[in-house]
Amino acid sequence: MSDRAFLSLENLTLSYGSSIAVDKFNLDIRKGELVAFLGPSGCGKTTTMRSIAGLLAPTSGRITLDGTDITRVSANKRNVGLVFQSYALFPHLTVFENVAFGLRLKRMPAADIEARVTAGLKSVGLSAFSGRKPAELSGGQQQRVALARSMVMEPKVLLLDEPLSNLDARLRVEMRAELQRVQKETGVTMIFVTHDQAEALSLADRIVVMREGLIEQIGTPEEIYNNPVSSFVADFVGFENVFALSDGKLATPAGAVALHETLPRNAAGFAWRPAGVALDTGPFKGRVKSVSFTGNLREYLLDTPLGPITAEVSAALPVHELGTELSFDLPLKAAAPLQRFA
Ligand SMILES: Nc1ncnc2c1ncn2[C@@H]1O[C@H](COP(=O)(O)OP(=O)(O)OP(=O)(O)O)[C@@H](O)[C@H]1O
């Protein structure tokens, strides 16, 4: 465990029967950090969270929290909070009583409960709703009650499993900001699970990209967004044009293709975002297969000898009709070199 680690996962391996869901996971999290586990369905995000919460015993490895080995400590003694995507509020209790529930179980004096719950509801902006029942709240408000209910327990680590996935798009963006604000104000160490790259990029201090039970990359949102280590991460963070490199050339359905610029031979592949593809210029040709308007931008899917290419240009430019042949270029300066392909 490094000096700065508050929560440390060392060689954590988690299995269901004989099938390994998470394999030798190593991660150090600093106090007050907001970390996102990002990855496709089934990559082991929830399994890792469940083990940190104490709901699943590791096959091997160690979990240390605030200097204590908690690997074998039971869930209710870990001081780790867990917020699920289904908020699991008690429908018959008021907002206040939902938030007070855990504190009452701990037999905290009534005056202290009153003070904590009042502060908790204030921090999530729900002071005016304390007397309502969950059914009288919007999805976002219910989610905030669930957040307050965990926060009042003053956990050392708060785990959120897809906390925003049940909310509509607008609320999700609102709640992202809310979560970030609450986390920064309270300084609680938080891990949240998501398969939404935009959510991870906009919220997290650090992102752990997972794939089939392994860590694919750990980095800040900027690092993950700009310097994906592999084609898997590149794909996941919106590089739609991803090529393997062999002998300094792009591997394409039309065979090896050289760019007019010399490609570094030590890369395993190269990836371009749609915005990195230069349109109406360059040595390559493609036919417009589809066009989509996304507000400020227009996205073209081109059928090309290099395979499908997605390019994005300003929507202010004249639109190219379906079937039009366009030239394009893949400029090296807009490319992300990949250390691993696949
Ligand atoms: N109770 C279980 N019994 C057996 N296998 C399980 C169980 N729960 C999960 N798995 C398997 O473990 C692997 C990891 O699952 P996990 O739920 O951690 O993935 P995830 O990344 O959280 O996925 P999602 O985004 O769909 O929630 C998957 O292959 C899954 O099928």
Image: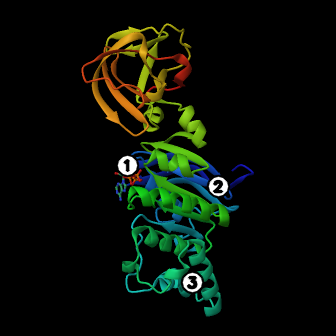
Amino acid type shown at disc 3 = Leu
Residue closest to the eye, 211 or 231: 231
- Side of 21 relative to 183 (left or right): left
Q: Is residue 302 above or below residue 238?
A: above
The answer to which of marks 1 and 2 sits earlier in the sequence is 2
Which structural element holds mark 2? loop
* Residue farthest toward the bottom in the current orientation of the protein: 110
Give the CA distance from mark 1 to mark 2: 25 Å
Residue closest to the eye, 314 or 128: 314
Contact? badges 1 and 2 (CB < 8 Å): no
Mark carried by residue 285: none
Mark carried by residue 103: 3
Q: Which residue is mark 1?
A: 42
Of circles 1 and 2, the one toward us is 2
Amino acid type shown at disc 2 = Glu
Q: In the image, is the residue at mark 1 within 8 Å of ligand 1 by its beta carbon?
A: yes
Q: Is residue 333 visible?
A: yes
Name the residue: 49% across, 26% down: 340
